Amino acid sequence: MAPAGIPEVIMNEREKAFQIHAGERPRPVVLASVSEIRAEMLHRAGLEVEVVRPGVDEEEIKAALLNEGARPNEIAETLAETKAVRVSLRRDQTLVIGADQVLDCDGDVYDKPGDRGQAAAHLRQLRGRRHRLNSAVCVALDGTALWRHIDRAEMTMRDFSDDFIEHYLDSLGAVALTSVGAYQLEGLGAQLFDHVEGDYFTILGLPLLPLLAFLRGHGIVAA
């Protein structure tokens, strides 16, 4: 079924234009993100990916949405769609993937830390508590969002010491500033947690399996 506002016949023609057959190489797609982790996930899944900086003022959009009372999941969805649509306007007949992740803890939304001091402050605030990662993805074509999906993961940090925070940040260096919460679960960040609930790819910042199902179901990658 075509998304709201897009006639079914138009969607069918667009799908035919991208249809591939078993044994053929996947169609190249554009990732509207500079996240190395997301690009690597797509590459390892067999997709040919072009990475494009979306050129979106994420902080301005996020601040406006928070001022309007938007929920964390709505912020993630809006940012993912804005990135995908914005880049798709510059890439004719090319599928563009946009993604975003928002961390919230008891209603407080966390951004990527700006420096080591802020990273340490975030870790002190999150330790011993449960927080949620809202990971959204959107696929756009020629300025129109074709598909959206959001998934969530629940993360419980252990009550680590201040000394551990300093050791952790010493070990990571600038890498700690590249993710919300100052952690990457696939690395040393695993030591911060007592318990996690949710899809691994969602925790890394991209609901990969639903995305692959969409691409497969619409003939973008071979079934």
Image: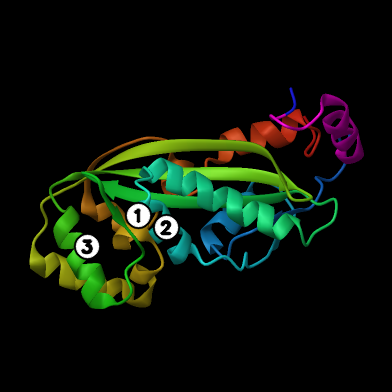
What is the spatial separation of the Cα atoms under label 1 and label 2, in whole angstroms?
Answer: 5 Å
Instruction: Give the residue at x 44% y 48%.
Output: 75
Q: Earlier in the sequence, mark 3 or mark 1?
A: 1
Q: Would you say the residues marked 3 and 1 are in contact, meaning their CB atoms lie under 8 Å apart?
A: no
User: Which circle's residue, 3 or 2, is located before the other in the chain?
Assistant: 2
Residue contact between numbered discs 3 and 2, judged by CB atoms under 8 Å: no
**Disc 3 to disc 2, how far (Cα)?**
22 Å
Where does the magenta region start and end?
3-19
Which residue lies at the image location 76% right of the left edge and 57% below the top edge?
A: 89
Residue 38 visible in this rendered orientation of the protein = yes
Distance between mark 3 and mark 1 Cα atoms: 22 Å
Tell me the tag on residue 207.
Answer: none
In-front residue for pair 26/119: 119
State the quadrant of the N terminus: top right
- Image-based side of 198 in relation to 43, left or right: left
Pick the residue in front: 164 or 61: 61
Kindly identify the amino acid type of the residue bearing the numbered disc 3: His
Residue 4 in percent (x, y) is at 69, 29
Tell me the amino acid under the disc marked 1: Asn
Q: Neighbour class for label 3 at 10 Å: few (<14), some, many (≥20)?
A: some
Circle 1 residue: 67
Residue 19 vs residue 190: left or right? right
Circle 2 residue: 64
Q: Secondary structure at mark 3?
A: helix
Q: Which residue is mark 3?
A: 122
> Are circles 1 and 2 on residues that touch, CB within 8 Å?
yes
Q: Is residue 116 left or right of residue 136?
A: left
Residue at figure coordinates x 60%, y 58% from the top left: 39
Tell me the amino acid under the disc marked 2.
Ala
Within 10 Å of the Cα at label 2, are there few (<14), some (14-19), or many (20+) other Cα atoms? few
Quarter the C terminus occupies: top right
